[in-house]
Amino acid sequence: MHTDTERCVRAVQSKDARFDGWFFTAVLTTGIYCRPSCPVVPPKPGNMTFYPSAAACQQAGFRACKRCRPDTSPGSPEWNQRADLTARAMRLIADGVVDREGVPGLAARLGYSTRQVERQLLAELGAGPLALARAQRAQTARLLIETTPLPMADIAFAAGFSSVRAFNDTVREVYALSPSDLRTRAPRNRPAPTTPGALSLRLPFRAPLNPDNLFGHLAATAVPGVEEWRDGAYRRTLRLPYGHGIVTLTPRPDHIACRLTLSDLRDLTVAISRCRRLLDLDADPTAIDDQLRADPLLAPLVDKAPGRRVPRTVDEAEFAVRAVLGQQVSTAAARTHAARLVTAHGDPVDDPEGGLTHLFPSTGALAAVDPETLAMPRTRRTTFTTLVAHLADGSVNLGVESDWAETRARLLALPGFGPWTADVIAMRALGDPDAFLPTDLGIRRAAGELGLPSTPAALTARAAAWRPWRAYAVQYLWATDDHPINFLPVQARSSPFEEPERNP
């Protein structure tokens, strides 16, 4: 979008927050860069130039605006709706791969040479992988400076910098302030974390956001010990590159309140990225809803509750295993199977608030499970053991860098994997915004009630007009059912997990 100057100027002049993260405005006369919704008086069009990323602005010598804080914009929706090299690279950079493995590690995961990856990112984003990772480190450093009392040296290494000097130089260059000045200017009215050692932050999103199906789905399918709904918040354990964590996510009108407790602060960037991915916070609801609303039979559903997101996952392998456990059984039964695996093979964790007890078992631990101990039909045991074996040896890769079409084909080649299982994994684990479930009973029932074709082939043909947002159409169709997955849990209810369901 940054190449469409006229459209960018209109967005800046109208202070349109919907475009935050899509592009950045660099002001030639002041040497700063802003988000489109910056509250200051817009500069003259001739003094504006536009960049596709904060890293590109920094590379060009611009510093971040102190008013609108462009580093806190929602991420570009491009990287979660595309499956090409650039999008896959951006998802890996957000997951901290460059900091942990360097640019060669990034290129190896993508299956390209380092030179090809750098050339592609420079062409589209105006910055290479090192610059993009550096911008992300600067953002993490600012978050730690402003929200924690940690010493600056600890913050430097937690944010991924190789030295305190690099940390100091980068912060000064990006924000035109020293780290100590940033801390001095930080707001003093932030609520103190209720849990010792916890970090409290705000996760921005593009409005509107309907939290009902998003948090309702996560709560209704929660695995005891790993996840829970408590006091209006979804909580779960996280398996992270350097350790583990516990996150509490609470829906607010204009942001998601996030409280993180980490065993190693170097995992902060990764934890934030995975929480944003879990809640689909970088989606562009306006573009999605406008296209779905063009179908007169879907329009009333969209108008009634716009801004539905796709509930995703913080661990792709975990979700795939849970999808297999949930084949042809109620949600209650699937949760029981998963809870047994967690108790027997999950890594114990200490939750300061109580309630959460384990990490979901790693694929290595699940690959060592004796199939005879699994209380499920023999055919599903075979499906389970085959999947975890392929996940453990890497022959099936569900990471953020995976190619959606290739991964779906690999899953369908496994015994016991039909289109429903492969597509629900594509939708919620891989993040494919166009994944569709025409054979799902809930979808077919909703289609029949709305007057849409109810047979899989006819419904798929009709859904072609919804592309590339068919995964979001699934959420609107599911919402026609009076089921707990579609509603925020009622706190007074003894348990939000009691009713059986199909396994969306």
Image (cartoon, rainbow, N blue to C red):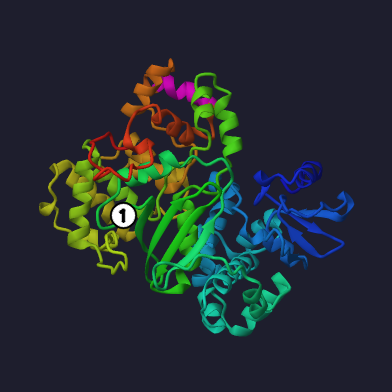
Find out whether residue 300 is within the magenta segment. Answer: no
Question: Does residue 425 appear anywhere in the picture?
Answer: no
Residue at position x 65%, y 58% from top?
121
Residue at position x 40%, y 31% from top?
479
Task: Answer left or right for 253 relative to 316.
Answer: right
Q: Secondary structure at mark 1?
A: strand
Quadrant location of residue 49? bottom right
Q: Which residues are magenta?
A: 457-465
88 up-or-down from 421: above or below? below
Which residue is more in the foreground, 118 or 333? 333
Q: Which residue is mark 1?
A: 227
- Residue 422 position within the rendered picture, expressed as x and y whole percent measured from the top left: 36, 40
Residue at position x 40%, y 55% from top?
314
Task: Answer left or right for 176 relative to 398.
Answer: right
Which residue is more in the foreground, 304 or 191? 191
- Residue 116 position within the rendered picture, expressed as x and y whole percent measured from the top left: 62, 60
Looking at the rendered structure, the kind of residue marked 1 is Glu
Residue at position x 53%, y 58% from top?
202
54 up-or-down from 495: above or below? below
Task: Answer left or right for 390 relative to 193.
Answer: left
Quadrant location of residue 418? top left
How would you classify the magenta stretch by its main secondary structure?
A: helix
Quadrant of image for the N terminus? top right
Quadrant of image for the C terminus? top left
